[in-house]
Amino acid sequence: MESLPAVLERGIDVHPTNEVIFVDDLDKALEYGDWPKVLLALQWGFLKCTYKELSSDATQAQIEIARSEFPTTIKQEDGSIWCTRLKEDDQRIATGYEIAYAKWISGDPWAAIRAVFVLGGPNDLASLERLLSSHRY
């Protein structure tokens, strides 16, 4: 719920707005966080993968071009180069988790967002009202 003000101000809950987010379907989204929840409906077409894999024979120029969007580079065991937006110490680099869930919005997050849902029970309404009244939108 504490992410709602950021979403209402910037269109997404990360700062800067092109930081990595982890997304999937409704079932996966509901696994995270406590109740009440804020759920974002994003258009898949605006979400980009956080990685690019280059072959072992990639030129330095190709690597530099990839690094402009994917600044962290990791040499894989097979010699290929994994370029990613995840930070160098992130354990999810080049894993199935990054491949399946890590995305980023390269443009305007307001173009990507379709809906914001606040999920909770009747007892959560007062907290939501307090949260919304404490911010100017």
Image: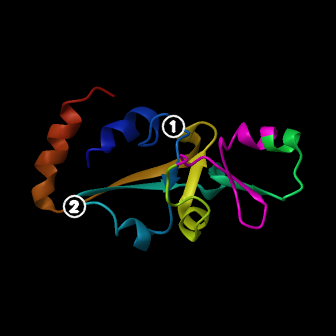
Which quadrant of the view contains residue 38?
bottom left
> Which circle marks residue 35 in the picture?
2
The location of residue 80, given as percent across then percent down, is: 78, 60
Q: Residue at x 72, y 40 (%)?
A: 67
Q: Residue at x 17, y 63 (%)?
A: 121
Amino acid at pointer 2: Trp
- Relative height, residue 33 to residue 131 (above, below): below
How many numbered marks have been drawn onto this rendered protein structure?
A: 2
| 107 horizontally vs 21: left or right | right
Q: Name the element at disc 2.
A: loop
Amino acid at pointer 1: Thr
The residue pinned by badge 1 equals 17
Residue 86 is one of the magenta-drawn residues: yes
Q: Residue at x 50, y 50 (%)?
A: 89
- Relative height, residue 104 to residue 27 (above, below): above
The CA span between labels 1 and 2 is 24 Å
Foreground residue, 4 or 22?
22
Task: Report the span colored magenta.
Answer: 64-88
Residue 101 is one of the magenta-drawn residues: no
Foreground residue, 64 or 121?
64
Q: Name the element at disc 1.
A: loop
| 33 horizontally vs 9: left or right | left
Q: Residue at x 39, y 32 (%)?
A: 9
The location of residue 47, given as percent across then percent down, is: 62, 52
Which quadrant of the view contains residue 133?
top left
Foreground residue, 106 or 73?
73
The location of residue 55, given as percent across then percent down, is: 84, 59
